[in-house]
Amino acid sequence: LAPCPHRAPCPLAPPDWCHFSRRVARSRLHRLAKDADVPWEDEKFIYVAASRDGPTSHQARVLAPPKSGSGKVLLKLCREDGTAVERLLTKRDGTDFKLARRLDWGDTLNNTAK
């Protein structure tokens, strides 16, 4: 069911892969074991959601945190046809742009914003 909205092979070419990073705190023992100076570490995570039933939605899914700028949002999407694309939405895109500003990694994109 997720992160891909299709049953095709992954469209991302190595070294790219579906993941997200979160900053996690290191304990004193962890810092000593890794000989680290900073009290945190950026860990990478990936997930898979599966079901015996087919997916109820085939909407494009956001593969990376959106990159926002003044009046624009760049989305990396995995589409229902098995392809990965980057989509730039600007203020000219109206409601699609407003929606894109609120999206985060893993969210689905509605069918009007393809």
Image (spheres, helix red, strand yellow):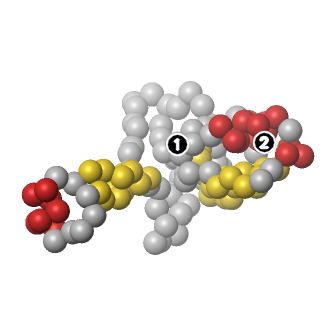
Q: Looking at the image, is 37 positioned above or below residue 57? A: below
As helix, strand or loop, the secondary structure at mark 1 comes to loop
- Quadrant occupied by the C terminus: top right
Chain-order first, disc 1 or disc 2: 2
List the residue tagged with mark 2.
Answer: 97
Residue 82: x percent and y percent? 60, 53
* Residue at position x 62%, y 40% in the image: 103
List the residue tagged with mark 1.
Answer: 106
The answer to whether residue 32 is seen in the rendering is yes
Residue 104: x percent and y percent? 57, 42
As helix, strand or loop, the secondary structure at mark 2 comes to helix
* Residue at position x 21%, y 69% in the image: 36
Residue 69: x percent and y percent? 72, 55
* Residue at position x 33%, y 56% in the image: 43
The answer to whether residue 6 is seen in the rendering is no
Q: Looking at the image, is 100 positioned above or below residue 36? A: above
> Which residue type does callout 2 highlight?
Phe
